Amino acid sequence: MRRRHTLGSLLLAPLLTACFASQGGDPGGDAGGGSRLRVALAFPPAESLSPYGDDATLLSRLGVTEGLTALDANGAATPALAASWRRENDRTWLFTVREATFQDGSEVTPAAVAAALTHAGEARPAPAALTGVTLTAKAAGDAVRITTRTPDPVLPLRLSSPSLAVFAAKAYGADGRVDPVGTASGPFELTRVTGSASATLDRFDDYWGGRAHAPGVDARFIADGTARANALRTGQVDIAEAIPVAQAATLDEATLRETATTRTTGLQLNTASGPFKDPGLRAAAREAVDTSAVVQGVFEGYADPGDGLYGPAVTWAEGKRTRPTGRAAAADPHGTSVTLATYDNRPELPEVAQVLQQQLQKAGFEVTLVVRAYARLESDVLAGKFDAFLGARNSLVDTGDPVGVLAGDYTCDGSYNLARLCDRTVDRVVAEAGAVAGTGERQDAALRAEAAVLGTDAVIPLAHQRIITGVATDVRGVLLDPYERTLLGPGTRR
């Protein structure tokens, strides 16, 4: 039987990890020795490693990219390529750019940073971190001045998003594409990508934060969770992310790292077309779901019951949630046929989908399951080709701002609106929350906006996952954080 952890110990775990978001400082002298790191990642590139979509997190987890800021263990903005910053007025911030070098040998300058942010602002679809935000960036001496169309009190948090990473000028093509190979600024340089199978990285010796211990990284994209666990067990890899709960018991307990995260497994209902356009049928689906069967039966205790859109790692939300209001009365499904889609990169999800299928059918729905790899599913979900989508979403991965994820996922103009929700009340309450500056006040406003979203039954939170990472016993310095943005840094070694 595996050792049980209290929630308190889980929440403290990220705080005890050595500065996961800050990669500054000498990681350990010359760092000339060491062995290459072998890593198994759960998600292959879905967008040719474009930094403007989900692939941005792949790049940040591998230590390839950086933005002006990063997030510390408490979710506050901390320096990265920006050494410091200050707010000049309601709409303008000045970020002082540190002395650093891109992996192609060119200098990280305020002009290069401004150009990178301009490219991100012009990308289509826009990065989720820029949902509802229009910014202008211009070089100003040793700094970059960033002006937003409307006041943005959390701009330093927003700029920590992996999708707003800064690249050298040669990375940006005339067609709008960004080539991250050899053009970023992190401790590891991407040198080769073999389709969706693997990637090779070498140590970037001129990294501003000090030379990495490991001379390089050999990354493999292994969508099958059992195969990832087997690769760790047999010594083929040193680090394997997202170990399935079913495989945890088969691994040496000393190799398992459990981290509370802000990741929520939820059922997104297509509110724009199909059966779940009817609020009564959405309410019926919500009432049919028993989250305890998911938490205990599928996640085997490696999760907490779904309580809103933010996970237990967001400690400020505990005991402060606003009860959803205005929910429709549940309608009788009368055998309504629905299609439920999910992906198998996270092996628990197909199991959860089967549990949901049984629960919904018991309530009177007829349910057809569709299971694919995530890369072959996302575009169809965004296009509304399914009635329901089961996914796992880290609510703070895009901006670190609790309002930002609501704007991106549940407003009319949201770029990652899987539920295709367009509700005037939700848009208004989210916009009001986005205008609040004070930290505590903004968190309270975010919870009011969360309640408005949940009141539409566009999403049914099921469970807040604890991520299990497999780490060989001779590996040190793995960066595990509740936002799942980091994995490898200068101090990661074996």
Image: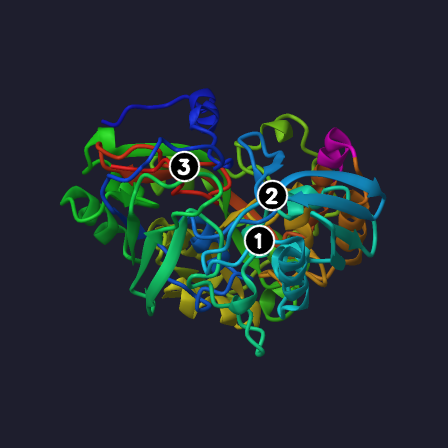
Which residue is at 29% across, 64% downward?
A: 197
Queried whether the magenta region covers residue 439, the answer comes back as yes
Instruction: Report how far apart the C-alphas of labels 3 and 2 lie in the structure.
Output: 23 Å
Secondary structure beneath label 1: loop
Instruction: Tell whether label 1 touches label 2 (CB within 8 Å).
Output: yes
Secondary structure beneath label 2: loop
Q: Which mark is residue 108?
A: 1
Magenta segment:
438-445
Q: Is label 1 or label 3 in front?
A: 1
Give the residue type that dot 1 points to.
Val
**Of the image marks 1 and 3, the number of the one nearer the N terminus:** 1
Farthest-out residue, left: 234
Q: Which mark is residue 479?
A: 3
Instruction: Report how far apart the C-alphas of labels 2 and 1 lie in the structure.
Output: 8 Å
- Looking at the rendered image, the quarter that the N terminus falls into is top left
Report the front residue among 274 and 3.
Answer: 3
Residue 256 in view (yes/no): yes
The quadrant where residue 377 appears = bottom left
Q: Is label 3 or label 2 in front?
A: 2
Q: Which mark is residue 98?
A: 2
Give the residue type that dot 2 points to.
Arg
Report the front residue among 162 and 95.
Answer: 95
Q: Would you place residue 175 above or below residue 43 in this image?
A: below
Q: Mark 3 packing: few (<14 Cα in 10 Å), some, or many (20+)?
A: many
Which residue is at 54% across, 51% downward?
A: 162
Instruction: Report how far apart the C-alphas of labels 1 and 3 lie in the structure.
Output: 25 Å
Queried whether the magenta region covers residue 307, the answer comes back as no
**Of the image marks 3 and 2, the number of the one nearer the N terminus:** 2
Q: Position of residue 389 (x, y in %)?
A: 50, 60
